[in-house]
Amino acid sequence: MRLALTTFTVWPVRAGRVDRATAGTAMALAPAVGALLGAALAGVLLLVGAVAAPLVAAAVTLGAGALLTRGLHLDGLADTVDALGSYRRGAAALEIMKKPDVGPFGVAALVVVLLVQAAALAELAARSWPAALAGVVAATAAGRLGVTLACRRGVPAARPDGLGALVAGTVGPVAAGVGTAAVALVAVAAVPGRPWQGPVAVLAALAVAVLLLRHLVRRLGGITGDVLGATVEVVTTLVYLGLAATR
């Protein structure tokens, strides 16, 4: 749990032992860390929403989320989309991901993702507090569950070193299945009057993530830390989109 906290949040704890066995447990616990983070962000959304417009509350919540995660997932999203937008493969694409600058594809991805998340959070802020809490917790936990699935057995690392090499192939099917069931259960309360919509949003987002990961493995040769960050943001955004849909 300490390694999971230091990987996914700014919580100041010692990581302790770091090896593949510990990393596998940490990646299996990623949804639990996401749920804790989601509860904190839901508190921000509700508190700010009590004194400001829903869109303002959504923007502040997104800012708090970036602060509490050091913006690492957003950085991973931008780098991954830049690599995909280059139409290069393998080592050439990985080299683009390592560059410190952000290209136009990465900037566009960040803008779209943040706009969609802000609009969806504004919709959740207008709901009852139990529904808003469940929605933010479910979306945030689902994003980290995407990492759990990305680290499942059979998924290789793109590089021989780095975070991807440490965590690739370390999570078994039981942990992934339990995490999926737990997050889907939390999402039941996210859409008042539609208990099915939350779980469907979670499962649909995870299905898209699996397809995206297959494509990234073909293009890059495996997963990297940036790929994991991109997975967090893609899944979180898709779940928010599914929860906010009212028609």
Image (tube, helix red, strand yellow):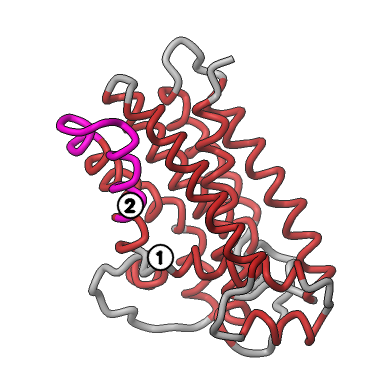
The numbered mark, 2 or 1, whose residue comes first in the sequence reads: 1
Give the Cα separation between the discs numbered 2 and 1: 9 Å
Query: In front: 104, or 235?
Result: 104
SS for dot 1:
helix
6 over 187 or under it: above or below: below
Residue 108 % position (x, y)? 61, 58
Residue 224 % position (x, y)? 63, 75
Q: Which mark is residue 37?
A: 2
The residue stretch that appears in magenta: 46-63
Q: Amino acid at mark 2?
A: Leu
Q: Could you tell whether 16 is left or right of 23 in the image?
A: left
Residue sitting at x 29%, y 24%: 130
35 over 28 or under it: above or below: above
Q: Are marks 2 and 1 in contact (CB under 8 Å)?
A: yes
> To which quarter of the image does residue 12 belong?
bottom left
Residue 241 % position (x, y)? 55, 34
Residue of label 1: 8
- Most distant residue in the left direction: 51
Residue 128 % position (x, y)? 29, 20
87 part of magenta stretch = no
Query: In front: 106, or 90?
Result: 106
* Quadrant of the rendering where the C terminus is positioned: top right
Q: Amino acid at mark 1?
A: Phe
